[in-house]
Amino acid sequence: QVQLVESGGGLVQPGGSLRLSCTASKNISSIYYMGWYRQYPGQQRELVARDTNTGTDLPYYPKSLEGRFTISRHNANNTVSLQIHNLKPEDTALYFCFAISQPFATPTWGQGTQVTVSS
């Protein structure tokens, strides 16, 4: 089973940008879904970006996040990144990387990285 380690979180001012990275313990080219969720305290995780390895499917973002969030899969170094622009205080959350090896499989999660947007 793949292991995932997130990095890149931190404190950012509103309007700033941040790049989160997720490093996998093995080759990710065969992993069907890779992406990111975020979680607010006391709430369920919500999907913020998802990439599919088909080569034809476009990445998925919730409508409310389109244009500010960009996911990229880098098979050469087994990483998935999440670029976030124009950060807002409501983006403050714990961000988790996930991997789903094939459709309907159980996801594997990283430990999470905290993003705090505050002046």
Image (cartoon, grey):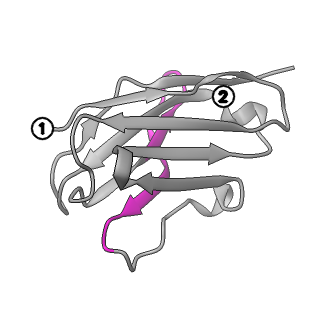
Q: Amino acid at mark 1?
A: Gln
Q: Is residue 4 left or right of residue 61?
A: left
SS under mark 2: loop
- Please report the bounds of the magenta region as a residue range: 36-54
Q: Is residue 31 visible?
A: yes
Which residue is farthest front? Answer: 76
Residue 41 in magenta? yes
Q: Nearer the viewer, mark 1 or mark 2?
A: 1
Q: Is residue 9 left or right of residue 108?
A: right
SS under mark 1: loop
Please identify the quadrant where the N terminus is shown.
top left
* Label 1, residues with CA under 10 Å away: few <14, some 14-19, many ≥20: few
Which residue lies under the disc numbered 2? 92
Which residue is farthest bottom? Answer: 56
Compared with residue 23, is residue 74 higher up or lower down, i.e. above or below? below
Q: Amino acid at mark 2?
A: Thr
Residue 49 in magenta? yes
Find residue 46 and report its horizontal and vertical position in percent: 47, 44
* Label 2, residues with CA under 10 Å away: few <14, some 14-19, many ≥20: some
Which residue lies under the disc numbered 1? 1
Residues at badges 1 and 2 in contact (C-beta under 8 Å)? Answer: no
Residue in view at x 50 percent, y 55 percent: 72
The quadrant in which residue 78 appears is top left
Residue in view at x 80 percent, y 21 percent: 118
